[in-house]
Image (spheres, helix red, strand yellow):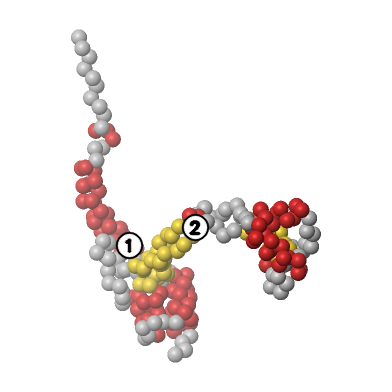
Amino acid sequence: MSRGPGQIQRAVLAILRGEPGGRSERDGAPLFASVTTLARRVYAVEEPTDAQRASVRRAVRRLEAGGLVEVRRLGVGRSYRQRRAHPRRAVPRYEERLAACTGDGCEGCAAGDRASTYFTADVIAMFIDFFGTLPEADRQLWRATARGWHLYSVPLPRPAEDYRTYPIEVTELCARRALSADEQERADQQLRDFLAPHIAAIQALRPRPDAAVTPPAEEAD
Ligand SMILES: [Zn+2]
């Protein structure tokens, strides 16, 4: 179904004027409806496409610019978990690698190191030190005689303890019809009435700052 922008705006406005989410128990004002909810109604589909949601989002923004609707980004009751590095930045750490050049696809060559073909006593000592045992150093030295050897550094991945998983709330653009000044005032009053007993209860539990004065110690005669 293809619809022009004006048609979508009219459809969205008609839906919002019908207060699709009902009214808030707290302030009596219409509840906000998400772009996805609106797109379902506008296009009569269960799962609106990204393009359909984008059209509805644009329509909502134009209606907002015209003062016909109010827009807010609200949580839609879903969250996901995201793994993030903490702290965000870390000093990169490197590991030195010693390896025989293997020709095609060689990691040392890829790291930009030119294979060395020196085999001095120092180089042999380095091989023994790096590979830990004489037989393994000997094996690696033999491999290195073909194309030489590399000493190069590779960045190490950040340690696992640098990562933490955070819950991220899914929010979506939501809209409701614009309230009249009267409606807004009534909603504000209703919200104050809703909150008043809770505020009173908190104040009853917590001594007021002026009541928390310690009585002066009586002086002995
Ligand atoms: Zn190489």
Q: Residue at x 57, y 60 (%)?
A: 157
Q: Position of residue 7 (x, y in %)?
A: 44, 84
Q: Position of residue 53 (x, y in %)?
A: 44, 78
Is disc 2 surrounded by few (<14), some (14 to 19) or many (20+) residues within 10 Å? Answer: few
The part of the image, by quadrant, that contains residue 142 is bottom right
**Which residue is most to the front?**
135
Apparent side of residue 92 relative to residue 116 in the rendered image (left or right): left
Q: Which residue is mark 2?
A: 160
Apparent side of residue 217 relative to residue 142 in the rendered image (left or right): left
**Which residue is most to the bottom?**
1
The part of the image, by quadrant, that contains residue 94 is bottom right
Q: Position of residue 162 (x, y in %)?
A: 50, 55
Q: Which residue is mark 1?
A: 184
Q: Residue at x 37, y 85 (%)?
A: 45
Which residue type does callout 2 highlight? Ala
Local SS, label 2:
helix
Q: Residue at x 76, y 66 (%)?
A: 145
Q: Marks 1 and 2: which is nearer the front?
A: 2
Which residue type does callout 1 highlight? Gln
Q: Are marks 1 and 2 in contact (CB under 8 Å)?
A: no
- In the rendered view of the protein, which quadrant contains the N terminus? bottom left
Local SS, label 1:
helix
Q: Residue at x 22, y 14 (%)?
A: 219
Apparent side of residue 200 relative to residue 184 in the rendered image (left or right): left
- Is 36 situated above or below 28? below
Upstream in sequence: badge 1 or badge 2: 2
In space, the residues marked 1 and 2 are separated at their CA atoms by 51 Å
Residue 125 versus residue 190: which sits nearer the camera? 125
**Would residue 126 be visible to someone looking at this image?**
yes
Apparent side of residue 117 relative to residue 191 in the rendered image (left or right): right
**Would residue 72 be visible to someone looking at this image?**
no
